[in-house]
Amino acid sequence: MLRISVVGWSMSCRGGSCRPKRCLMTLAVVERTGHSLNGWSAFSVLVENIFCFLFCGRKMILLVILLFLHDNLDMTKIYPRESAEIEYKRSVTDSFLKTVSAFSNTGDGVILFGIDDKTRESCGLPDPEETYRQIKNKINDSIHPEPVYSLSINDEDHTVKLEVREGDSKPYYYGQTAYIRKGSSSVPMSSLLLERLILKRDRRSFDDLPAPEGSYSFSGFEEEARNRFGLEQLGTDAQKSLGLRDLNGQVTVAGALLADKNTFPGMDLVVLDNDDLYGEREKVDGISILQQLESAVAFFRRYYRREAVTGNLQREEIFLIPESAFREAVSNALVHRTWDTPSNIVIRMFPDRIEIQSPGGLPDGISEYEYLHKDLSVPRNVTLATLFLRLGLIEKLGTGVRRILRSYQGQYRQPDFDFTPNSMTVILPVLNQKPSLSLSEVEVIRQFQDMETLSRAELSTSTGFSRSKLGLILKKLVENKVLAVEGGGRSTRYRLNPNAENLK
């Protein structure tokens, strides 16, 4: 409890309507009787008497208020709101088992028993030890496989803490259902996510699964395999060894995707101007992904291939965007996309760039940095990746980004990569593009003529630009990749992009 004690005071009233009894009655009672007030009541008394002291003319010689914040302070603890990582229960009911499944499948979390989930105040448990045993028994009897968790009792407020770790043996079921965490709720897992977790647990990829029932032929793949690695005949045994059929002779998803015809998603090819106005469009689906690749390349050539006359009057093909980079990006999209979602690969062709967007973000276990800089590959469709490698359609696994970047060596504008949880986009700019620079931007670039790096203060001194103007210029030059940033805070320095040397 919040205890207010008056050590000593005196007052005088110069008349008027002020009532000393009303002003200091509560404090006097506290002093004489030792009566305790709760936190809010004590606070209101304190505020009332401060106003009385300020506006009613009383002169308080000495007023000492002692706040005992240990035994005498009963300010009930309010816990944070429930979230994706924390949940409260007044007592043990079977509903908490859904949350154990969800935390095990989604991420680490905590369940506190003995906390009111509405007020978020501690209400305690009548028998924490018994609650501890109930929780343990229910988890062991109801969650499978066995989750990773720990239990502890807080003797001060008589609560029990259950800490659940994200497991390595997903999916974790409560009964016949696996749950995931969505916000502060535990909801049943979708069949799509459930299937993906089962495949990951069993170390299988989606393209190894049996394909939908149908009649599949492989004439296109057989010809490609004969030309690429000398396969004489694509019989049933050869199809099994290549992963086009499983051991039972059933066509796999990989086989269906490489078959002459199938029912899987395809590609949307669209030409746009820079205002996103549509031009030509083409949809490619229902055919082998090898044919899809060639259709995309043919579409690409209509817009980004040119003929030029050389000095010896010979005609020569030139490409506004490297065809090798486009082929690699589309091949990677076909091999690494998620084939269990009914979305098409979308290829958008602009006057200054191409965007290749494929369903599915980065595979689990790989970061953006590792994907872009460390040649790290975690194939989402192992059989497809192996077959594309054997056919020479992609280089060594994990080197696709390097191959794309190599085709832009020495260019000012470089390829870009954009990742979201559900998609990956490769952006290939047109070659030999230079940014449209203002005179002020050119002036900043000139400062790097004899200097490798410069700070903002040094640039401000040499150009004479104000801090705000220079800040906007630097921001634009960094966004356009004319300048690179090194360090941070006061140690920030700017360096001219090597591909932008000719912009000085």
Image (cartoon, rainbow, N blue to C red):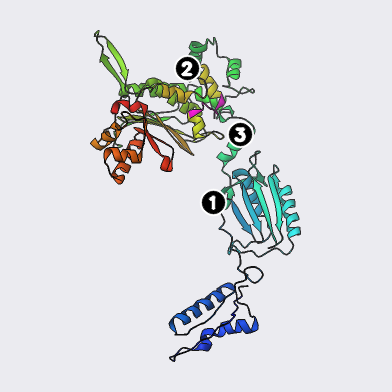
- Cα–Cα gap, marks 1 and 2: 48 Å
Q: Residues within 10 Å of mark 1 (few under 14, many from 20)?
A: few
Q: Quadrant of the C terminus?
A: top left
The residue under label 2 is which amino acid type? Answer: Gly
Q: Residue furthest bottom?
A: 15
Report the residue at 27% width, 38% height from top: 463
The x, y position of residue 439, in whole percent, is 23, 35
Q: Is 381 a magenta residue?
A: yes
Report the residue at 60% width, 78% height from top: 5
Direction from residue 369 to residue 197 in the image, left or right: right
Q: Quadrant of the N terminus?
A: bottom right
The residue under label 1 is which amino acid type? Answer: Gly
Are the residues tagged 3 and 1 within 8 Å (C-beta)?
no
Residue under numbered circle 3:
200
Q: Is residue 276 above or below residue 108?
A: above
The x, y position of residue 487, in whole percent, is 44, 38
Q: How many marks?
A: 3
Looking at the rendering, the stretch of residues picked out in magenta corresponds to 373-382
Instruction: Please report whichever mark, 1 or 2, sits nearer to the chain's N-terminal start.
Output: 1
Evaluate whether residue 210 shows in this view.
yes
- Cα–Cα gap, marks 3 and 1: 24 Å
The residue under label 3 is which amino acid type? Answer: Lys
Residue under numbered circle 1:
183
